[in-house]
Image (cartoon, helix red, strand yellow):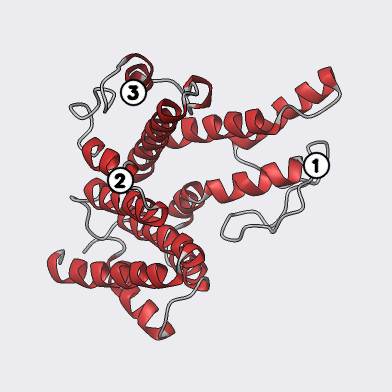
Amino acid sequence: MAKYYYLISSLPELFFEAGHFKNSDFLHLRDYILENISDGDAVYVHDLLGNIDNYNLIAAVYGKRRAWKKGGKYDEFRSPDDSEKPVLPEYMSDFLEYIDSYKAEYKTNPDEPAAEKYLSELYYDKMESSDNPFIAKWFKFDREMKNIQTAYTGRRTGISAENYFVKKDDITEFLLKNASPDFGLSRERDYVPDLFRALETPNLLERENRLDMLRWNQIDEINIMEYFSIDVALGILQKACIADRWLALDSVEGKKMFRKLVDDLIEFKKVKIV
């Protein structure tokens, strides 16, 4: 029997016990998964949710007074020169060294959007080189999708997107040089036609919903041959992140997504028995 059979098969009941869906369900799910996996696999959970820590790190560095996002690994960050700061992943340490070097030379922090972009590139570099298949594939997809959206918006507004891409690769070459409506990418990536149909949806909420359902379906595609493994747990957690975001945007749609997540889990138990 697979390593995490009990964990995956018990998740529908975790939601049924709550009786309804609310913002705390994402945190409840994250904690439940962390309590039932190995320390080694817990690293992948924290990697997956690293964008939460990145958001909080930017806020700490720039002294922004905004609510601390919950769900990340770190409860606080100290200033870069504080010897008591928590042990951070290498990409965060590299980012803080960059901040230190810039401040030493220019007596101020770098422009915040530029710093945030640099942190994102360090983060995606680490994630895409992960030894966990789900992490590596998911972050490659996520970055490519964001870059395509950036190019699409740039084309519509007449603003060059080149300086806003997260990393440069073969996809950004298409985005910079190909003048066709889909940037010539429909033959390169299966998800591109659905992505452009979503981007061309006039209604903002409907567009966001379609984009998130594309992300949802990509999770299933990545894990199509996975059974009761850590990759499945990571995919479920990422779906819960999507549903949690919708609870803030539109509570009705958010509850529908949590309901869909439970239904997916129930069907998964029926089909993928080992």
- In the rendered image, residue 173, in percent from the top left (x then y), is placed at 36, 16
Left or right side of 146 for 221: left
In percent of width and height, residue 268 lies at: 20, 66
Mark 3 residue element: helix
Q: From the image, which quarter does the N terminus lie in?
A: bottom left
SS for callout 2: helix
Q: Residue 58, how many percent across, how many down?
A: 68, 42
> Which residue is drawn at the image coordinates 78% and 27% (left, top)?
100
**Disc 2: which residue:** 198
Tell me the amino acid under the disc marked 1: Ser
Front residue of 68/193: it is: 193
Disc sitting over residue 171 in the figure: 3
Tag count: 3
Determine contact: label 2, label 3, CB under 8 Å: no
Lower sequence index among marks 2 and 3: 3
Q: In the image, 87: left or right of 7?
A: right
- Callout 2: few (<14), some (14-19), or many (20+) C-alpha neighbours within 10 Å? many
In the rendered image of this protein, does residue 119 appear above or below residue 174?
A: below
Of badges 2 and 3, the one in the foreground is 2
Residue tagged by mark 1? 79
> In the picture, residue 184 is in which quadrant?
top left
Residue extending furthest toward the top? 177
Q: Secondary structure at mark 1?
A: loop
| Earlier-in-chain disc, 3 versus 1 | 1
